[in-house]
Image (cartoon, rainbow, N blue to C red):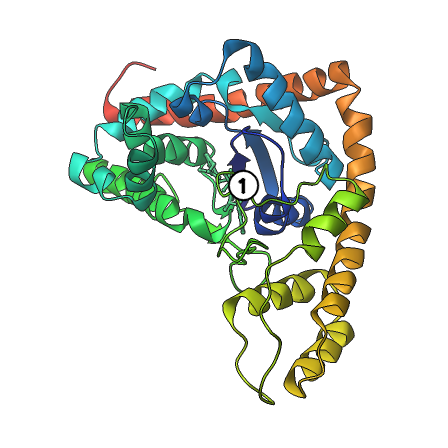
Amino acid sequence: MEKVVSGIRPTGNLHLGNYFGAVRSFVAMQDKYQCMFFIADWHSLTTHPKPEDIQQSARTILAEYLACGLDPKKAPIYVQSDVRETIELYLYLNMNMYLGELERVTTFKEKARQQPDNVNAGLLTYPTLMAADILQHRANWVPVGKDQEQNMEMARKCARRFNNIYGVEFFPEPQNFYFSDQAVKIPGLDGSGKMGKSEGNCIYLRDDDKTITKKVMRAVTDNGPQEPNSQRPDVIENLFTFLRIVSTPDTYQYFDEKWNDCTLRYGDLKKQIAADLVAVVAPIREKIEYYSANTELLDQIAREGAEVARESARATLNEVRRIIGFRV
Ligand code: ADP
Ligand code: TRP
Protein backbone atom coordinates (compact mmCIF):
# COMPACT_ATOMS: atom_id res chain seq x y z
CA MET A 1 0.00 0.00 0.00
CA GLU A 2 1.25 3.49 -0.78
CA LYS A 3 2.59 5.47 2.14
CA VAL A 4 1.71 8.98 3.28
CA VAL A 5 3.56 11.26 5.70
CA SER A 6 2.94 14.83 6.73
CA GLY A 7 3.47 17.22 9.61
CA ILE A 8 2.79 20.71 10.89
CA ARG A 9 4.97 22.84 13.14
CA PRO A 10 3.47 23.39 16.62
CA THR A 11 3.46 27.17 16.56
CA GLY A 12 0.15 28.46 17.89
CA ASN A 13 -3.18 26.94 16.91
CA LEU A 14 -4.46 25.44 13.70
CA HIS A 15 -6.25 27.91 11.45
CA LEU A 16 -8.46 27.54 8.41
CA GLY A 17 -5.44 27.67 6.09
CA ASN A 18 -3.91 24.66 7.87
CA TYR A 19 -7.25 22.87 7.91
CA PHE A 20 -8.31 23.32 4.30
CA GLY A 21 -4.73 23.31 2.96
CA ALA A 22 -3.46 20.25 4.81
CA VAL A 23 -5.33 18.58 7.69
CA ARG A 24 -8.50 17.94 5.68
CA SER A 25 -6.36 15.91 3.27
CA PHE A 26 -4.82 13.98 6.18
CA VAL A 27 -8.30 12.95 7.30
CA ALA A 28 -9.34 11.89 3.80
CA MET A 29 -6.16 9.88 3.24
CA GLN A 30 -6.11 7.83 6.43
CA ASP A 31 -8.66 5.35 5.07
CA LYS A 32 -6.97 4.79 1.73
CA TYR A 33 -3.25 4.84 2.45
CA GLN A 34 -0.81 3.77 5.09
CA CYS A 35 -0.45 7.13 6.84
CA MET A 36 1.65 8.65 9.56
CA PHE A 37 1.23 12.18 10.82
CA PHE A 38 3.52 14.08 13.11
CA ILE A 39 4.11 17.34 14.93
CA ALA A 40 7.25 19.04 13.65
CA ASP A 41 8.64 20.36 16.94
CA TRP A 42 12.28 20.20 15.78
CA HIS A 43 11.43 22.47 12.90
CA SER A 44 9.96 25.01 15.31
CA LEU A 45 13.35 25.27 17.11
CA THR A 46 14.57 27.62 14.38
CA THR A 47 12.84 30.39 16.35
CA HIS A 48 14.06 29.24 19.82
CA PRO A 49 10.79 28.55 21.71
CA LYS A 50 10.87 28.47 25.54
CA PRO A 51 11.61 24.99 27.01
CA GLU A 52 8.51 25.15 29.21
CA ASP A 53 6.28 25.65 26.17
CA ILE A 54 7.59 22.81 23.99
CA GLN A 55 5.45 19.90 25.21
CA GLN A 56 2.31 21.95 25.68
CA SER A 57 2.55 23.30 22.11
CA ALA A 58 2.77 19.76 20.78
CA ARG A 59 -0.26 18.71 22.85
CA THR A 60 -2.22 21.66 21.50
CA ILE A 61 -1.73 20.56 17.90
CA LEU A 62 -2.30 16.92 18.78
CA ALA A 63 -5.70 17.77 20.33
CA GLU A 64 -6.54 19.78 17.22
CA TYR A 65 -5.45 16.99 14.84
CA LEU A 66 -7.70 14.53 16.69
CA ALA A 67 -10.61 16.97 16.73
CA CYS A 68 -10.31 17.34 12.96
CA GLY A 69 -10.86 13.60 12.61
CA LEU A 70 -7.42 12.02 12.59
CA ASP A 71 -7.76 8.55 14.05
CA PRO A 72 -4.60 7.13 15.66
CA LYS A 73 -5.97 3.60 15.09
CA LYS A 74 -5.84 4.20 11.35
CA ALA A 75 -2.83 6.49 11.24
CA PRO A 76 -0.26 6.79 14.03
CA ILE A 77 0.40 10.35 15.19
CA TYR A 78 3.78 11.14 16.70
CA VAL A 79 5.94 14.00 17.86
CA GLN A 80 9.00 14.48 15.63
CA SER A 81 11.47 14.80 18.52
CA ASP A 82 10.41 11.38 19.89
CA VAL A 83 11.93 9.68 16.83
CA ARG A 84 15.67 10.35 17.09
CA GLU A 85 16.40 8.13 14.08
CA THR A 86 15.35 11.04 11.87
CA ILE A 87 18.48 12.95 12.82
CA GLU A 88 20.80 10.25 11.51
CA LEU A 89 19.12 10.31 8.13
CA TYR A 90 19.20 14.14 8.22
CA LEU A 91 22.98 13.96 8.59
CA TYR A 92 23.42 11.59 5.64
CA LEU A 93 21.12 13.63 3.41
CA ASN A 94 22.91 16.86 4.33
CA MET A 95 26.14 15.44 2.90
CA ASN A 96 24.50 15.48 -0.53
CA MET A 97 22.90 18.93 -0.37
CA TYR A 98 24.76 21.99 -1.56
CA LEU A 99 25.00 25.39 0.07
CA GLY A 100 23.98 27.22 -3.09
CA GLU A 101 20.76 25.30 -3.60
CA LEU A 102 19.77 25.57 0.07
CA GLU A 103 20.38 29.32 0.00
CA ARG A 104 18.10 29.67 -3.01
CA VAL A 105 15.01 28.24 -1.24
CA THR A 106 12.45 31.05 -1.02
CA THR A 107 11.33 30.23 2.52
CA PHE A 108 14.96 30.43 3.67
CA LYS A 109 15.39 33.82 2.03
CA GLU A 110 12.12 35.02 3.57
CA LYS A 111 13.06 33.83 7.06
CA ALA A 112 16.53 35.34 6.72
CA ARG A 113 14.82 38.65 5.98
CA GLN A 114 12.32 38.25 8.86
CA GLN A 115 14.92 37.27 11.49
CA PRO A 116 18.23 38.81 10.32
CA ASP A 117 19.82 38.30 13.76
CA ASN A 118 19.09 34.58 13.75
CA VAL A 119 19.97 33.13 10.34
CA ASN A 120 21.01 29.79 11.80
CA ALA A 121 22.16 26.63 10.02
CA GLY A 122 18.93 24.87 11.05
CA LEU A 123 17.01 27.38 9.00
CA LEU A 124 19.28 26.72 6.02
CA THR A 125 18.90 22.93 6.28
CA TYR A 126 15.18 23.05 7.07
CA PRO A 127 14.39 21.32 3.75
CA THR A 128 16.83 18.49 4.52
CA LEU A 129 15.14 17.81 7.86
CA MET A 130 11.79 17.83 6.11
CA ALA A 131 13.17 15.40 3.52
CA ALA A 132 14.38 13.12 6.35
CA ASP A 133 10.87 13.22 7.91
CA ILE A 134 9.44 11.97 4.65
CA LEU A 135 12.14 9.63 3.34
CA GLN A 136 12.61 7.77 6.65
CA HIS A 137 9.21 6.20 5.98
CA ARG A 138 9.85 5.93 2.22
CA ALA A 139 6.61 7.83 1.71
CA ASN A 140 4.98 8.20 -1.70
CA TRP A 141 2.60 11.07 -0.93
CA VAL A 142 2.79 14.19 1.20
CA PRO A 143 -0.34 16.26 1.76
CA VAL A 144 0.72 19.90 2.19
CA GLY A 145 -0.40 23.34 1.12
CA LYS A 146 0.85 25.20 -1.92
CA ASP A 147 3.53 27.08 0.03
CA GLN A 148 5.41 23.82 0.60
CA GLU A 149 6.00 23.06 -3.09
CA GLN A 150 9.63 24.15 -3.04
CA ASN A 151 10.42 22.15 0.11
CA MET A 152 8.85 19.15 -1.60
CA GLU A 153 11.03 19.74 -4.66
CA MET A 154 14.05 19.59 -2.32
CA ALA A 155 12.79 16.36 -0.75
CA ARG A 156 12.57 14.79 -4.22
CA LYS A 157 16.06 16.05 -4.96
CA CYS A 158 17.37 14.38 -1.76
CA ALA A 159 15.76 11.09 -2.79
CA ARG A 160 17.05 11.23 -6.37
CA ARG A 161 20.54 12.20 -5.35
CA PHE A 162 20.89 9.46 -2.78
CA ASN A 163 19.68 6.90 -5.33
CA ASN A 164 22.09 8.24 -7.98
CA ILE A 165 25.15 8.47 -5.76
CA TYR A 166 24.78 4.89 -4.53
CA GLY A 167 23.31 3.46 -7.72
CA VAL A 168 20.18 2.18 -6.00
CA GLU A 169 16.42 2.56 -6.40
CA PHE A 170 15.84 2.90 -2.68
CA PHE A 171 13.90 6.08 -1.97
CA PRO A 172 10.69 6.75 -3.90
CA GLU A 173 10.32 10.39 -4.98
CA PRO A 174 7.58 11.75 -2.72
CA GLN A 175 4.78 13.58 -4.50
CA ASN A 176 2.60 16.44 -3.24
CA PHE A 177 -0.96 15.42 -2.55
CA TYR A 178 -3.78 17.93 -2.91
CA PHE A 179 -7.28 17.40 -1.61
CA SER A 180 -8.89 18.79 -4.73
CA ASP A 181 -7.42 18.73 -8.24
CA GLN A 182 -5.46 21.87 -7.40
CA ALA A 183 -3.59 23.15 -4.37
CA VAL A 184 -5.87 25.46 -2.39
CA LYS A 185 -4.52 28.62 -0.93
CA ILE A 186 -6.76 30.04 1.77
CA PRO A 187 -6.58 33.81 1.47
CA GLY A 188 -6.54 36.29 4.34
CA LEU A 189 -9.67 38.35 4.89
CA ASP A 190 -7.60 41.50 5.35
CA GLY A 191 -6.88 41.77 1.64
CA SER A 192 -3.66 39.77 1.79
CA GLY A 193 -3.09 36.72 -0.39
CA LYS A 194 -2.58 34.14 2.35
CA MET A 195 -4.07 33.31 5.71
CA GLY A 196 -1.14 32.63 8.01
CA LYS A 197 0.10 32.93 11.56
CA SER A 198 2.83 35.39 10.71
CA GLU A 199 0.33 37.42 8.68
CA GLY A 200 -1.81 37.73 11.86
CA ASN A 201 -5.04 37.33 9.90
CA CYS A 202 -6.19 33.86 10.92
CA ILE A 203 -9.55 32.37 11.73
CA TYR A 204 -8.67 29.60 14.19
CA LEU A 205 -10.40 26.27 14.71
CA ARG A 206 -10.61 27.33 18.37
CA ASP A 207 -12.46 30.57 17.59
CA ASP A 208 -16.02 30.75 18.93
CA ASP A 209 -18.99 31.47 16.66
CA LYS A 210 -19.05 35.16 17.50
CA THR A 211 -15.35 35.63 16.81
CA ILE A 212 -15.60 33.82 13.47
CA THR A 213 -18.59 35.93 12.44
CA LYS A 214 -16.85 39.13 13.51
CA LYS A 215 -13.71 38.26 11.54
CA VAL A 216 -15.71 37.47 8.40
CA MET A 217 -17.91 40.59 8.67
CA ARG A 218 -14.76 42.72 8.92
CA ALA A 219 -13.32 41.32 5.67
CA VAL A 220 -11.96 43.97 3.32
CA THR A 221 -14.19 44.71 0.29
CA ASP A 222 -14.60 47.48 -2.30
CA ASN A 223 -17.47 49.65 -3.60
CA GLY A 224 -19.31 46.76 -5.18
CA PRO A 225 -19.73 45.49 -8.75
CA GLN A 226 -19.79 48.38 -11.23
CA GLU A 227 -20.40 46.64 -14.56
CA PRO A 228 -22.20 43.38 -15.36
CA ASN A 229 -20.00 40.30 -15.73
CA SER A 230 -16.81 42.10 -14.76
CA GLN A 231 -13.75 40.39 -13.35
CA ARG A 232 -13.66 40.33 -9.56
CA PRO A 233 -10.86 42.24 -7.82
CA ASP A 234 -8.63 40.10 -5.56
CA VAL A 235 -10.28 41.02 -2.25
CA ILE A 236 -13.69 39.96 -3.59
CA GLU A 237 -12.35 36.83 -5.26
CA ASN A 238 -10.94 35.93 -1.83
CA LEU A 239 -14.49 35.91 -0.42
CA PHE A 240 -15.66 33.75 -3.30
CA THR A 241 -12.80 31.34 -2.56
CA PHE A 242 -14.28 30.82 0.90
CA LEU A 243 -17.72 30.39 -0.57
CA ARG A 244 -16.40 27.75 -2.97
CA ILE A 245 -14.79 25.83 -0.12
CA VAL A 246 -17.44 25.94 2.62
CA SER A 247 -20.79 26.53 0.87
CA THR A 248 -22.87 24.41 -1.50
CA PRO A 249 -22.46 24.78 -5.29
CA ASP A 250 -25.98 26.28 -5.42
CA THR A 251 -25.05 28.96 -2.94
CA TYR A 252 -21.90 29.74 -4.89
CA GLN A 253 -23.88 30.04 -8.10
CA TYR A 254 -26.46 32.30 -6.41
CA PHE A 255 -23.85 34.82 -5.29
CA ASP A 256 -21.92 34.51 -8.55
CA GLU A 257 -25.07 35.51 -10.45
CA LYS A 258 -25.66 38.41 -8.05
CA TRP A 259 -22.10 39.61 -8.75
CA ASN A 260 -22.61 39.30 -12.48
CA ASP A 261 -25.86 41.30 -12.55
CA CYS A 262 -24.47 43.88 -10.08
CA THR A 263 -27.02 43.23 -7.32
CA LEU A 264 -24.59 41.65 -4.86
CA ARG A 265 -24.59 43.03 -1.32
CA TYR A 266 -21.35 42.17 0.43
CA GLY A 267 -23.12 42.05 3.82
CA ASP A 268 -25.28 39.14 2.61
CA LEU A 269 -22.28 37.34 1.13
CA LYS A 270 -20.33 37.68 4.37
CA LYS A 271 -23.26 36.49 6.48
CA GLN A 272 -23.53 33.38 4.32
CA ILE A 273 -19.80 32.64 4.56
CA ALA A 274 -19.81 33.20 8.33
CA ALA A 275 -22.78 30.85 8.85
CA ASP A 276 -21.26 28.11 6.68
CA LEU A 277 -17.85 28.46 8.35
CA VAL A 278 -19.40 28.24 11.81
CA ALA A 279 -21.13 25.03 10.74
CA VAL A 280 -17.72 23.53 9.86
CA VAL A 281 -15.75 24.86 12.82
CA ALA A 282 -18.19 24.56 15.77
CA PRO A 283 -18.18 20.73 15.97
CA ILE A 284 -14.39 20.68 15.63
CA ARG A 285 -14.05 23.25 18.42
CA GLU A 286 -16.14 21.12 20.78
CA LYS A 287 -13.87 18.15 20.17
CA ILE A 288 -10.76 20.29 20.68
CA GLU A 289 -12.09 21.17 24.13
CA TYR A 290 -12.67 17.50 24.90
CA TYR A 291 -9.19 16.36 23.86
CA SER A 292 -7.38 19.34 25.39
CA ALA A 293 -8.77 18.37 28.80
CA ASN A 294 -7.39 14.82 28.41
CA THR A 295 -3.63 15.24 28.70
CA GLU A 296 -3.04 11.60 29.59
CA LEU A 297 -4.87 10.37 26.53
CA LEU A 298 -2.87 12.79 24.35
CA ASP A 299 0.44 11.62 25.79
CA GLN A 300 -0.49 7.97 25.34
CA ILE A 301 -1.48 8.51 21.69
CA ALA A 302 1.85 10.26 21.05
CA ARG A 303 3.80 7.49 22.79
CA GLU A 304 2.14 4.76 20.76
CA GLY A 305 2.56 6.75 17.55
CA ALA A 306 6.27 7.22 18.22
CA GLU A 307 6.78 3.48 18.61
CA VAL A 308 5.34 2.77 15.18
CA ALA A 309 7.28 5.65 13.61
CA ARG A 310 10.55 4.57 15.22
CA GLU A 311 10.20 1.06 13.92
CA SER A 312 9.52 2.29 10.41
CA ALA A 313 12.46 4.74 10.56
CA ARG A 314 14.80 2.10 11.96
CA ALA A 315 14.05 -0.31 9.12
CA THR A 316 14.86 2.40 6.57
CA LEU A 317 18.02 3.46 8.39
CA ASN A 318 19.37 -0.08 8.54
CA GLU A 319 19.10 -0.23 4.76
CA VAL A 320 20.60 3.24 4.38
CA ARG A 321 23.58 2.34 6.60
CA ARG A 322 24.16 -0.80 4.60
CA ILE A 323 23.97 1.13 1.30
CA ILE A 324 26.42 3.79 2.51
CA GLY A 325 28.81 1.15 3.82
CA PHE A 326 28.36 1.34 7.59
CA ARG A 327 27.96 -1.53 10.00
CA VAL A 328 24.29 -2.24 10.72
P1 ADP B 1 1.49 29.29 8.85
O1 ADP B 1 1.75 29.82 7.47
O2 ADP B 1 0.27 29.85 9.44
O3 ADP B 1 2.70 29.40 9.75
P2 ADP B 1 2.31 26.60 8.47
O4 ADP B 1 3.41 27.15 7.62
O5 ADP B 1 2.65 26.03 9.80
O6 ADP B 1 1.21 27.74 8.67
O7 ADP B 1 1.51 25.52 7.60
C1 ADP B 1 1.17 24.21 7.99
C2 ADP B 1 0.45 23.53 6.84
O8 ADP B 1 -0.74 24.26 6.48
C3 ADP B 1 1.28 23.46 5.55
O9 ADP B 1 1.00 22.24 4.88
C4 ADP B 1 0.77 24.62 4.75
O10 ADP B 1 0.95 24.42 3.37
C5 ADP B 1 -0.70 24.67 5.13
N1 ADP B 1 -1.19 26.07 5.04
C6 ADP B 1 -0.89 27.09 5.88
N2 ADP B 1 -1.52 28.23 5.52
C7 ADP B 1 -2.25 27.92 4.40
C8 ADP B 1 -3.14 28.66 3.54
N3 ADP B 1 -3.41 29.94 3.78
N4 ADP B 1 -3.69 28.01 2.50
C9 ADP B 1 -3.44 26.69 2.27
N5 ADP B 1 -2.63 25.94 3.04
C10 ADP B 1 -2.03 26.53 4.09
N1 TRP C 1 7.55 22.47 6.52
C1 TRP C 1 6.20 22.12 6.90
C2 TRP C 1 5.41 23.41 7.19
O1 TRP C 1 5.96 24.42 7.48
C3 TRP C 1 6.18 21.23 8.11
C4 TRP C 1 6.87 19.94 7.87
C5 TRP C 1 8.05 19.52 8.42
C6 TRP C 1 6.45 18.88 7.00
N2 TRP C 1 8.37 18.31 7.96
C7 TRP C 1 7.43 17.87 7.09
C8 TRP C 1 5.35 18.72 6.17
C9 TRP C 1 7.33 16.69 6.36
C10 TRP C 1 5.25 17.53 5.45
C11 TRP C 1 6.22 16.52 5.54
O2 TRP C 1 4.22 23.34 7.16
Q: Mark 1 — residue?
A: 200
Percent position (x, y) of residue 104? 23, 44
Observer-nearest of 102 and 210: 210
**Residue 69 appearing in the image:** no
Q: Is residue 19 above or below residue 313?
A: below
Q: Where, by quadrant of the figure, is residue 181 drawn? A: bottom right
Amino acid type, mark 1: Gly
Query: If the image is split into quadrants, where does the N terminus sit?
Result: top right
Q: Is residue 37 above or below residue 245?
A: above
Query: If the image is split into quadrants, where does the C terminus sit?
Result: top left
- Left or right for 223, reference 206: left
Q: Check disc 1 and report its element: helix, strand or loop.
A: loop
Residue visible at 82% across and 52% down in the picture: 279
Percent position (x, y) of residue 122? 32, 25
Crowding around mark 1 (Cα neighbors within 10 Å: few <14, some 14 to 19, many 20+) is few
Percent position (x, y) of residue 208? 78, 40
Q: Where, by quadrant of the figure, is residue 105 drawn? A: top left
- Which residue is at the far top? 52
Residue visible at 42% across and 28% down in the picture: 316
